[in-house]
Amino acid sequence: MEALARSMGADHPAKPVLVLSNAPDAGGLQKAADLGIPTAVVDHRQFNTRPDFETALHKALLTAKPDIICLAGFMRILTAGFTEEWTGKILNIHPSILPLFPGLHTHQRALDAGMAVHGCSVHLVTSELDGGPILGQAVIPVLNGDTPENLAARVLPMEHQLYPTVLKKFALGDETKTTIM
């Protein structure tokens, strides 16, 4: 989130209008406030059903009127009803080279599979978990002795480079795939 927000300087076609979290204690809320970006919380634990939670998310987003929604560390699965309301407008960063290793524990799964490379992907969000069209990928080598923790630490700077690059292109209407190696 912070890398995206900081990338949106004067020459960027997008501007942050809201940082919305489902976790009241998310560190990104204070970082956003420090950057002068409005914040909001829709705590999923306050809702009995996923549709009720998503209705509240939808309402908060409608108030902010975003053209693009960028998920970053948002660890909730969104239903088809929600994603269809925002079709073509939600981006997500995922710590694997999709379609490999959707979901959780991607770094361990890459190591267990004996992958020679690993990385991250930015994709459009659809109702399929980590299955929307891929807009960009960054790739790093898997090194002998890598652990899930140090592999994650080496992928993170690639995420911070890839996501802002893809967002800028997407905001300009360019959906051609970006590759960073």
Image (cartoon, rainbow, N blue to C red):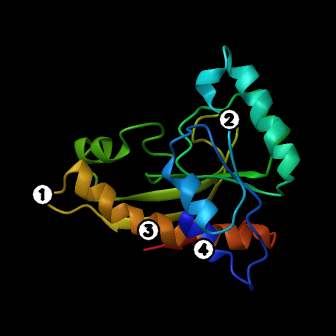
Query: In whole angstroms, how far apart are the C-alphas of marks 4 and 3?
Result: 15 Å
Quadrant where the N terminus is found in the figure: bottom right
Identify which amino acid the numbered label 4 is placed on.
Answer: Arg
**Residue 177 visible at all:** no
Residue positioned 70% across, 63% down in the render: 37
**Residues packed near mark 1 inside 10 Å, few (<14), some (14 to 19) or many (20 plus):** few
Q: Which residue is mark 1?
A: 145
Q: Which mark is residue 119?
A: none
Q: For numbered disc 4, what is the local secondary structure?
A: helix
Mark 2 or 4, closer to the camera: 2
SS at badge 1 = loop
* Mark 3: amino acid: Met
Q: CA distance from mark 4 to mark 1?
A: 33 Å
Determine if residue 36 is in view.
Answer: yes
What is the x, y in percent for residue 61?
80, 45
Residue 157 lies in quadrant: bottom left
- Residue 169 placement (x, y as % from top left): 71, 73
SS for dot 3? helix
Q: Secondary structure at mark 2?
A: loop
Q: Which mark is residue 158?
A: 3
Residue indicated by mark 4: 6
- Determine whether 9 is above or below 151 in the image: below
Which residue reaches farthest top? Answer: 48
Labels 3 and 1: the sequence-earlier one:
1
Amino acid type of the residue tagged 2 in the rendering: Val
Residue assigned mark 2: 42
Q: Is residue 50 above or below residue 67?
A: above
